Amino acid sequence: MCSFCDQFKMGWPSIFLIAIISTLLASSYAEIRHTSINADSRAVIEFEKFGFSAKGHLDISISNLSFTPLGPDPNPSFMGFFLVTEENWFEIKMEYSMLSGSALEAYCVLKNELVTKLFDFGEIDPSTQFFNKPFEAPEANEYKLMFGNCLPKVQVWMNVRTAMYNLQGNGKMDYLSVGQAPLPKLYFSLFFLYMVLGGGWCYVCWKKKKTIHMIHILMGVLVVMKALNLLCEAEDKSYTKRTGTAHGWDIAFYLFSFVKGVMLFTVIVLIGTGWSILKPFLQEKEKRVLMIVIPLQVLANIAAVVIDEAGPSIQGWVTWKQLFLLLDVICCCAVLFPIIWSIKHLREAAQTDGKAARSLMKLTLFRQYYIVVVSYIYFTRIVVFALKTIISYQYSWTCDLTSELATLAFYIFTGYKFRPESHNPYFRLDDEEEEAAAEEAIADDDFEL
């Protein structure tokens, strides 16, 4: 039974790290999924992760089942499906890491008391090509649906259909995890908020049409893309909640997510360089940042769609998700460089330029923007992920709310600070403003990144 060995030949730090990553990256809502397993000999295969209520249900259908009978008469009862909580799965890994010798060879996860065994292949009539069985959730909790194969090097072929849902008070099926059920209403509400924000931005640009620049138009388009992204995500979740499938809204959601993601980083880079406001062109090093960020965003978005649609059952799923998370972090770090360069340039200008106060006010503005961008990236990439590891599964929707509110605050701050104004710090100051800013600059310490 040592095929399980290959999954857990690692020390305590590695096991702990993978447990944390799995918590962060695994999808916490489900739908009706069709998964094909072909010539797979892995000891464990994760299919879904779902938060069940007290009236949780699971339907599993298997067709075209076969396996390669390597060795003397393999026992099909050593292959099957089970449910396990995140906490118990972590404990199982800890227990396994301590085994050795004959105990290690004889170990089978299906026999562990910490898992809820659903069925094994010994219960399936080998003459039939189809198996279907409904189950009730053991109790209200978040579970992983997993397949265990305790036969060394035995390869499995099968088509698996899974449907996880909770029954509502009226008897209707809710295919969203308990912690994700409020998301459709949440995203619809945020969609209307961004539409109001977009309308307000259009009014400001119309009122200040003599001072608007191309960057202001791009900022307005970004708000529209964000609103459409939220609308598609709301429809995606709404249809999934009722029917178990997204009915094509997931395609629209991925499309607008891609456009919004690329535009967001582009706008941050352009604002960070003062493009179209301070100067009409980008320098070579700033163009290189865009040439790095945009292709990486395109690659990460397309690959993430493919991986998410395939689900955690594919080999190397966690590794690929880690890679795309790393690409996202690289993009986030790359967009900071133009702002740093602008701050450095303004610091030098403040020391040599005759209009020092003007440069100092621009420097103050870029300081604030740099701090806000760093805070936004840190909060949405790290703090929100940390919240997901400690918050109860019933309230996982609050992590999405927290992230979206941070994004909304970032959009509002950016729009307010860089709105079209005739007396914007970007532009020439009058003599009184010049003198006032010069007096403030006397007590101003050098800015340290």
Image (cartoon, helix red, strand yellow):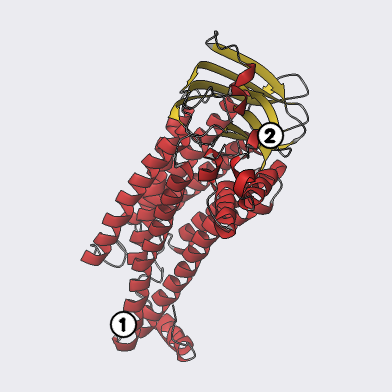
Any part of residue 51 in sight: no
Q: Which quadrant of the rendered structure holds the N terminus?
A: top right
The residue lying at 52 percent from left, 26 percent from top is 246
Residue 430, x across and y down, in percent: 38, 78
Location of residue 133 (image quadrant): top right
The residue lying at 58 percent from left, 18 percent from top is 61
- Per the rendering, the mark at residue 111 is 2
Between the residue at mark 1 and the residue at mark 2, the CA separation in whole angstroms equals 71 Å
Mark 2 Cα-neighbour bin, 10 Å: few <14, some 14–19, many ≥20: few
- Residue that lies at the very extreme toward the left in this rendered image: 284
Mark 1 Cα-neighbour bin, 10 Å: few <14, some 14–19, many ≥20: some
Q: Which quadrant of the rendered structure holds the C terminus?
A: bottom left
Q: Nearer the viewer, residue 377 or 446?
A: 377
Labels 1 and 2: the sequence-earlier one: 2
Q: Amino acid at mark 1?
A: Ala
Q: Is residue 59 left or right of residue 200?
A: right
- Per the rendering, the mark at residue 92 is none
Q: Amino acid at mark 2?
A: Lys
- Per the rendering, the mark at residue 349 is 1
Residue 313, x across and y down, in percent: 50, 34
Location of residue 132 (image quadrant): top right
Q: Is residue 198 above or below residue 356?
A: above
Q: Is residue 39 left or right of residue 137?
A: left
Residue 11, x across and y down, in percent: 56, 57
Count the labels in the image: 2
